[in-house]
Image (cartoon, rainbow, N blue to C red):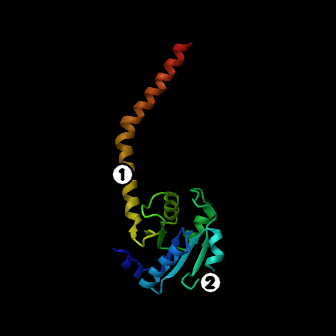
Amino acid sequence: MDFASIIRGAVQVAIIRSSYPRHLEDALKKVKELNPDAKTTVLVMPRMVPALKGHTMIDEIISLPTDQETYSPNIEPQFIDSVRKRQLPLFIILYNRANQCGYQNVEKLALSFQPREIWGMTSDGEFFHLSDSYRFIRGLKRMLIRLFYAPVVLPMVCLLRFSSFYLRRAAR
């Protein structure tokens, strides 16, 4: 499915990570253009909350428990649970760079809320589906671990342990 059809069918949309009001404004306009009835929730750093209060296209503002540019992967479980209880089905992560790199913590945060769909939006206004990418990468990681860890890493670990044991013993 493409982004437009996903948004048209969405009842609620959550937008996460924006320290650039213009980028957030572009995302809100796109969502409301495709589905004027969609309820929008934004998850932003605490310092952004005062600037967004009263915004006509935002139905709910959730203040993230950090004001850092990069999110900690150890955000309090209570916060994760409180957002999960809202059952937000669709998350849009705003990427400030066109290369979509350097946002792993934000992506992990969005995944921790267990939405049905996660999409990314670049600063150029391009949308891409993130859920498929994550499933592929996780599957690839598991496959690589099975292929290489046991046959390559385990013998190396055993060899290193044996050699260090042998060297210590020989040094006595």
Cα gap from disc 1 to disc 2, whole angstroms: 44 Å
Task: Kindly identify the amino acid type of the residue bearing the numbered disc 2.
Answer: Gly
Along the line of sight, which residue is nearer the eye, 2 or 30? 30
- Determine which residue is flagged by label 1: 140
The residue sitting at 48% across, 68% down in the picture is: 93
Quadrant in which the N terminus appears: bottom left
The residue sitting at 47% across, 23% down in the picture is: 162
Count of labels in the image:
2
The residue sitting at 59% across, 56% down in the picture is: 74
Along the line of sight, which residue is nearer the eye, 150 or 118? 118
Local secondary structure at mark 1: helix
Q: Residue 46, which numbered label?
A: none
| Residue 31 image-quadrant placement | bottom left
Task: Please name which of the two marks, 1 or 2, marks the residue nearer to the observer.
Answer: 2
Local secondary structure at mark 2: loop
Q: Residues within 10 Å of mark 2 (few under 14, many from 20)?
A: few
Dot placed on the residue nearer the N-terminal end, 1 or 2: 2
Task: Kindly identify the amino acid type of the residue bearing the numbered disc 1.
Answer: Leu
The residue sitting at 37% across, 54% down in the picture is: 139
Q: Is residue 163 above or below residue 122?
A: above
Q: Residue 54, which numbered label?
A: 2
